[in-house]
Amino acid sequence: MSAAGSGPRLDTGVGYSLRVPGSWFEVDVRPATRAVSAAELVNRRITDLPELRERRADIVRLIRNQAAAAWDAGAVYCAVMAEPVADGLLPACVTVSFLPGPVDASSDAEDRLSPLMTTLTTKVAKAEGDPWTEVTTVELPEAGTAARTFGVEDVEDPEAGSGVGLNRSVRVVTMQTYVPLPDINRVAVVTCSSPAIEVAPALLDVFDAITGTFRLWRAADLVEGV
């Protein structure tokens, strides 16, 4: 993984970093600049990968839409995969968000995961092809123990509109990893998703590898290391 995204120091004195494969696009989510940024980003990539040229407009549109969705969801970081395939693009997205922790959690508790785990729900598919969700815990090499959900889910489609009879959901393969921040009741959420459910097992492996690079760091540690 050659590309690296890192976020600003938060008001809590905690920052983060995440690495994505070099073929992914790290996206500017800010409304004022994301449209121009997406076009420039794709133009630079086409210079190195001319095979993307035929899909330029589709890739720019995908990046803009993902950036807008990430911003609307409160994400501070977004990266997008757009691999050309025979009938279009194979898309995927990863975002990083910071949310309040569970209301009954304590930032100085020895066990930070149990309050998180109680908010997550397993879903068993009623029939083959139905949505499903598993809940587990994982050990991130540079961020410690985290809670995780993964599976195939139906989520709201922001492009579907609101007309009567319109399908307003899209089925996606998704993985969300919840990392308690040190010394404060907030949670970092790394969300990976793709509508390419036919290759869900392979995508979940990719999502796990990307999330495994997530790191939290303290401002004090950074200063001491200078």
Image (spheres, grey):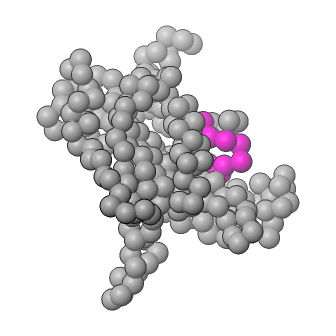
Q: Does residue 28 appear in the picture of this structure?
A: no
Taking depth in this image into account, of 111 and 61 the one nearest to the observer is 111
Quick one: quadrant of the N terminus? top right
> How far across and how far down the image is residue 110, in percent?
24, 17
- The residue positioned 47% from the left and 60% from the top of the image is 172
Question: Height in image: 76 above or below 198?
Answer: above
- The residue positioned 44% from the left and 69% from the top of the image is 170
Q: Which residues are magenta?
A: 19-30
Quick one: quadrant of the C terminus? top right
> How far across and how far down the image is residue 53, in percent?
81, 66
Return the residue found at the far bottom: 164
- The residue positioned 26% from the left and 36% from the top of the image is 117
Return the residue found at the far top: 224
> How far across and how far down the image is residue 116, in percent?
26, 36
Return the residue found at the far front: 127
Taking depth in this image into account, of 131 and 192 the one nearest to the observer is 131
